[in-house]
C-alpha cells in the first residue's frame, strides 16, 4: 500500500500548483497534488496562450499537460478528479481527506485552488447552459453562425471573444454593467471598429428567456430602469473569475474579496501553510504570475521544512 | 483523433453494438476546453462503474453526424461536448457543455444504476 504521508500536499493542480510540484519533487520532497477537477486548471480553458515566455504560441491544454508530465517525472503524485472532503491544517502535521482515495498527512500544505468563473446567479442561467448559454467562444461559436448573440462582460475576455465571434455571427450585443470597459484600450478599440458589434451599457441582466433553447436576454438599465429585450440565440458570459477559497474560510486569513492573505514569501496566517496563484491576494492574474507564485511557495515550504523541526517519521514496518 | 484514455467510437457498427444493449456513456466532443474536463471525469469513473462502458467520439467525424448528432435528444444543444447516456437501446439522459464529476455521478446513480427505471431522459 502507498504510504499516505508526504512532505508537502498541494491543493490545486493549475499553473501554480503544478509549478510548486515541479520545484518540490525536484528537491526530493515527497509531494502529493490533489485536484478536484482536471489537472491544468484555467490553462485548459485557454485555446491559445501567446504570452508565456519561451513559447511563441501553444494551447493552454498543451502547456498544462507538459507541466504535469514534468512534475510526475520528478516524482510528484498527482490525483485528478479528487475532492478534498475534510482538512485539518492547524497542527505541525496537516491532514487531508480525499473522497475515494483516503486520508493523507503532510508537514506543509500549499493552497493553489485558483479561481472559478463568476456567474450571474440567475436561475435561468443554469436552465440554458449548453442550450444557448456558453462560456467558451472557440468551443461553441460555430453553433451560432449567422445568428444574433449577446456577450456579457466588459473585460479583455469579453471584448476579445466578441471580436472573434463577430466573424461568424450576424450580430453581437455586448451587455456590460458599467458605462466604461475594464478591458485594455487597444482591445476596446478593436471591438468598436467591428460593425457587427453593438454596445448596451449600464445594464443588469435580469433573465434569459426561451423554450427548448435561448431566445432573448432581458436587461434593465441600472439608472433609468428601462427594460431591453435583446433577441439572442446565444449568450456568452465572460464576467471574470473569483478566488475559489470558500472552504478555507476560518482556516487561513482571507480578505474581504475571499482572497487568501499572504506575505511576500507566500506564507498564510497558519504556519506551514502557503498559498499560490489566483487564489491569493494579488493584482495580476496570469499564467506567468501563477508560475512565479508556485515557485516561491515551493521554495518557502522547503525552507519551512528545513527549519520547522517537523520530520517525517519512518515508514511503518 | 481524440487524445484521451477512453476507448473511441469510430464506426456506426461500434455505436450500435455499444448502445443497443447494456449501459454506455458517450462523450461526443473535440479536444477543447469544455470537453477535456468531461473526458477526465469519465476516465476517473471507469473503474468505479465497471458495468458501464465509457466512450468518446470525435464531434466532427462522419460517425458522429450519423449517430449522436442525429439524436432528437441533442437537437437543441449548443455547447460541447454532447454527453449521452444509453441503457438497453434507450437514451436515458443527455447533457450539453461541461459537467462536473458530481453532476455525472448524479446521472449515473439515478438513471443508470440497477434498480432505477430506464426512463427516457
Ligand atoms: C479563458 C481564459 C483565458 C486566459 N488566458 C490567459 C493567457 O492567454 N495568458 C495568461 O498568462 N493567463 C491567461 N489566463 C489566466 C490564467 O489562466 C490564470 O491566471 C492561471 O492559470 C491561474 O493559475 P492557478 O494555478 O492560480 O489557478 P487555476 O488555474 O484556477 O487552478 C486551480 C486548480 O485548483 C483546483 N481546485 C480548486 N478548488 C479545489 C479544491 N477544493 N480541492 C482540490 N482542487 C481544487 C481546480 O480544479 C483547478 O484545477 C486566462 C484565464 C482564462 C479563464
Image (cartoon, coloured by chain):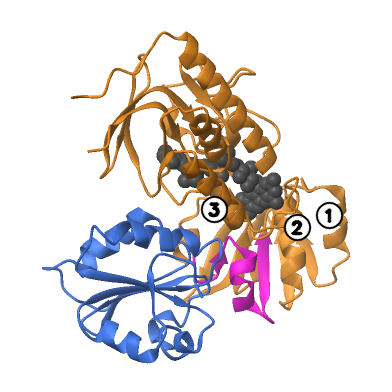
Q: Quadrant of residue A230?
A: bottom right
Q: Residue furthest front?
A: A317
Q: Quadrant of residue B45?
A: bottom left
The colour assigned to chain A within the rendered structure? orange
Ligand 1 found in image quarter: top right
Residues beneath discs 1 and 2 located on the same chain: yes
Give the crowd class for mark 3: few <14, some 14-19, many >=20 residues within 10 Å: some
Residue at 72% x, 47% y is A52
Give the crowd class for mark 2: few <14, some 14-19, many >=20 residues within 10 Å: many
Q: Which residues are magenta?
A: A129-151
Residue B101 lies, in percent from the top left, at: 36, 55
Residue A117 lies, in percent from the top left, at: 55, 48
> What is the CA distance from the residue labelled 1 to the residue labelled 2?
7 Å
- Of all chains, the one bearing label 3 is A
Where is the C terminus of chain A found, in terms of image quarters?
top left
Q: Are marks 1 and 2 in contact (CB under 8 Å)?
A: yes
Q: Is residue B32 visible?
A: yes
Q: Is residue A196 magenta?
A: no
Q: Quick one: label 1 or label 2, which is nearer the N terminus?
A: 2
In the image, residue A67 above or below residue B11: above
Q: Is residue A115 visible?
A: no
User: Is A80 displayed left or right of A290 in the figure?
Assistant: left
User: Is A293 displayed left or right of B15 in the figure?
Assistant: right
The colour assigned to chain B within the rendered structure? blue
Q: What label does residue A188 carry, if any?
A: 1
Amino acid at each position: 500500500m502507498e504510504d499516505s504521508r508526504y512532505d508537502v500536499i498541494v491543493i490545486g493542480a493549475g499553473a501554480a500548483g503544478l509549478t510548486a510540484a515541479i520545484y518540490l519533487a525536484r528537491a526530493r520532497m515527497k509531494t502529493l497534488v490533489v485536484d478536484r477537477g482536471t489537472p491544468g486548471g484555467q490553462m485548459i480553458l485557454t485555446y491559445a496562450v501567446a504570452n508565456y515566455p519561451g513559447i511563441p504560441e501553444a494551447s493552454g491544454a498543451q502547456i498544462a499537460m507538459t507541466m504535469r508530465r514534468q512534475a510526475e517525472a520528478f516524482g510528484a503524485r498527482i490525483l485528478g478528479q479528487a475532492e478534498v472532503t475534510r482538512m485539518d491544517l492547524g497542527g505541525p502535521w496537516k491532514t487531508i481527506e480525499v473522497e475515494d482515495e483516503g486520508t493523507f498527512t503532510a508537514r506543509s500544505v500549499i493552497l493553489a485552488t485558483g479561481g472559478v468563473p463568476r456567474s450571474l446567479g440567475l436561475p435561468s442561467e443554469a436552465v440554458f447552459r449548453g442550450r444557448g448559454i456558453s462560456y467558451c467562444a472557440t468551443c461553441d461559436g460555430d453553433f451560432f453562425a449567422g445568428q444574433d448573440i449577446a456577450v456579457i462582460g466588459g473585460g479583455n475576455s469579453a471584448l476579445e471573444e466578441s471580436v472573434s465571434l463577430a466573424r461568424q455571427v450576424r450580430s453581437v450585443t455586448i451587455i456590460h454593467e458599467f458605462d466604461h470597459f475594464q478591458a485594455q484600450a487597444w482591445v476596446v478599440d478593436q471591438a468598436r471598429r467591428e460593425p457587427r458589434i453593438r454596445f448596451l451599457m449600464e445594464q443588469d441582466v435580469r433573465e434569459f428567456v426561451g423554450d427548448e433553447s435561448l431566445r432573448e436576454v432581458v436587461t434593465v438599465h441600472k439608472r433609468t430602469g428601462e427594460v431591453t429585450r435583446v433577441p439572442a440565440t446565444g449568450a456568452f458570459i465572460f464576467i471574470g473569475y473569483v478566488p475559489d477559497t470558500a472552504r478555507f474560510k476560518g482556516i487561513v486569513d482571507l480578505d474581504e474579496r475571499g482572497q487568501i492573505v499572504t506575505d511576500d514569501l507566500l506564507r498564510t496566517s497558519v504556519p506551514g501553510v502557503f498559498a499560490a496563484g489566483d487564489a491569493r491576494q494579488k493584482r495580476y492574474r496570469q499564467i506567468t504570475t501563477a508560475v512565479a507564485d508556485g515557485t516561491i511557495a515551493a521554495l518557502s515550504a522547503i525552507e519551512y521544512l528545513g527549519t520547522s523541526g517537523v520530520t517525517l517519521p519512518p515508514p511503518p514496518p | 483523433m481524440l487524445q484521451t484514455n477512453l476507448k473511441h467510437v469510430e464506426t456506426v457498427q461500434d455505436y450500435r453494438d455499444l448502445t443497443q444493449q447494456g449501459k454506455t456513456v458517450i462523450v461526443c466532443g473535440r479536444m477543447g476546453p469544455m470537453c477535456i474536463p468531461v473526458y477526465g471525469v469519465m476516465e476517473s469513473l471507469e473503474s468505479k462503474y465497471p458495468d458501464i462502458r465509457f466512450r468518446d467520439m470525435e464531434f466532427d467525424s462522419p460517425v458522429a453526424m450519423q449517430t449522436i448528432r442525429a439524436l432528437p435528444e441533442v437537437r437543441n444543444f449548443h455547447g460541447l461536448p454532447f454527453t449521452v447516456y444509453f441503457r438497453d437501446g434507450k437514451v436515458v439522459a443527455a447533457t450539453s457543455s461541461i459537467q462536473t464529476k458530481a453532476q455525472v455521478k448524479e446521472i449515473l446513480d439515478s438513471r443508470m444504476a440497477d434498480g432505477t427505471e430506464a426512463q427516457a431522459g
